[in-house]
Amino acid sequence: MTTTAAGVPATKQKRSIPGFAQAQRVGRSLMLPIAVLPAAGLLLRFGQPDMLGEQGVSSWPGMAWMLPVANVFAAAGNAVFGNLPIIFALGVAIGFARKSDGSTALAGLVGYLTFSAVLDALAPYFGAGAEGEETINYGVLGGITIGIIAALLWQRFYRTKLPPYLAFFGGRRLVPIITAFVAVVVAVLFALIYPAFNAVIGGFGRWVTDEGNVVIGGFVFGTLNRLLIPFGLHHLLNNLPWFQFGEYTNPDTGQVAQGDIFRFFAGDPTAGTFMTGFFPIMMFALPAAALAIWRHAKPERRKVTGGIMISVALTSFLTGITEPLEYAFAYVAFPLYVVHAVLTGTSLALVNAIGIKDGFTFSAGAIDYLLNFGIATMPLWIIPIGLGYAVIYYLIFSFAIKRWNLRTPGREEEGDTASGAPSVFDEAQEAAAVSTGARAAEEREGRRQNPAAAVAEDTGKAAPELDRDDPDRVPTTEPSAYDDPARAVGKAYEERRREREEREGGTPPVA
């Protein structure tokens, strides 16, 4: 055994995959711009002819005044979808940078405007487009790239001091200036490689969206999409098919739409290849998995587990947000999660083989299903397919949980923390204690009995964070666990973990 000089066994260093943490940061930063899509999708959908337009509400007797309202909604929705690259540049800049503020967003905005203008200037020399139109269009990929660059430059230069005669341009004000110059260089490099980029991405996009390849393309995408969720990298994969692959020109407006999502709402009858198959899984299959987890929980924990599973199943069905449910078994039963990923791939392959086309603005839940029912192709088929997958999921999950005694929520052993992950059951108890005021009452009583310690705790954790080198920085205070319910849950869980370790005679693991 390897030991240190003092004779103490050396702790094993955790190995990390190079670039993995950065890739996770990029994936998380994409959530900010993606969050605006549901609102834009609702506006765009209500403005369509079959909703409030000339074929919908506006055609009813006495409702012609709704036509301009529909046009306003459609214009508002198109304003977001038509400017996705700049929205991604701003959102990624804010989300990727640590301790970002308004100057980070300004740097992303200035950087992307510069980047776009330089590409337009170089388009006649390096561009490629349909019908002789020379363009350089990187779509949201360009916005993401500039957003990351702006965030990195902000972290590097936001404290930079300049000589007294240039002091006004120092600190945060310097970052947008540097970003503009860097964006020029990046734009030139991107223009040089654009012919090759356009050929590769365009060719692959045409292949994967071709009618003869949508089955295998849907299967591969659906499987990889689910497999990457536990690692937080699925948003990197989603970017290409949802926002980049395929191109459709609206015959009425002449507007060019890229990516599965925007092409679907622009009226492309071939769009939906990378979206439709998620509806049966998120609306039916995963809620059935939640039912299986609930049914096979221990009797004494079935009530709490049922409350959790009903909540996450309803969330999955209505909104298509599946992470809370998938995380419940992704880490304790990863082979079962792999089966779930493969079944998701088969769902995308099946609906593409049948020719069903549907889409969403946020995720494949019942809300998007109902809103887009009128513009989908054969949407009713999603219901029987989803019910079939629900039966398959329930049987597979029930068999796996019983056969291998999986530690799904409600089946954990008392004090079982060997995996290092918190028990869903324990977290639910602590969350209930906080939400009902029990934990807050306990802390209030402790503060009354020992006010000096309470003051010391708050002041010790709430020291003003003031950077002397940055006169623009505003001092902030960190709230105590007493004031912040989210921190109270974490603090309560740590207390319970230490109590269990003391009862078992163990010591906290070495990080």
Image (tube, rainbow, N blue to C red):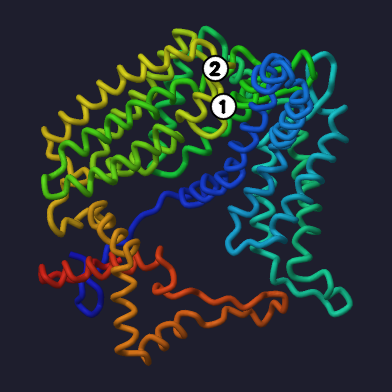
Q: Position of residue 487 (x, y in %)?
A: 40, 67
Residue 305 position in % (x across, y down): 23, 46
- Judged left or right of residue 372, residue 323 is left
- Work out whether residue 105 can be spotted: yes
Tag 2 near tag 1, CB within 8 Å = yes
Please name the amino acid that badge 1 sits on. Pro
> N-terminal of the two: label 2 or label 1?
2
Going 81% across and 59% down the picture, which residue do you hit?
A: 177
In front of the other: 433 or 404: 433
Relative height, residue 421 to residue 83 (above, below): below
At numbered mark 2, what does the secondary structure look like: helix, strand or loop? helix
Which residue has dot 2 on it? Answer: 208
| Disc nearest the viewer among 2 and 1 | 1
Q: Does 65 appear above or below 215?
A: below
Under circle 1, the secondary element is helix
Disc 2 from disc 1: Cα separation: 9 Å
On the rendered image, what quadrant is the C terminus found in?
bottom left
Residue 145's place in the image compared with 507, above or below, is above
Q: Amino acid at mark 2?
A: Val
Mark 2 surroundings: few (<14), some (14-19) or many (≥20) residues within 10 A = many
Q: Which residue is mark 1?
A: 241
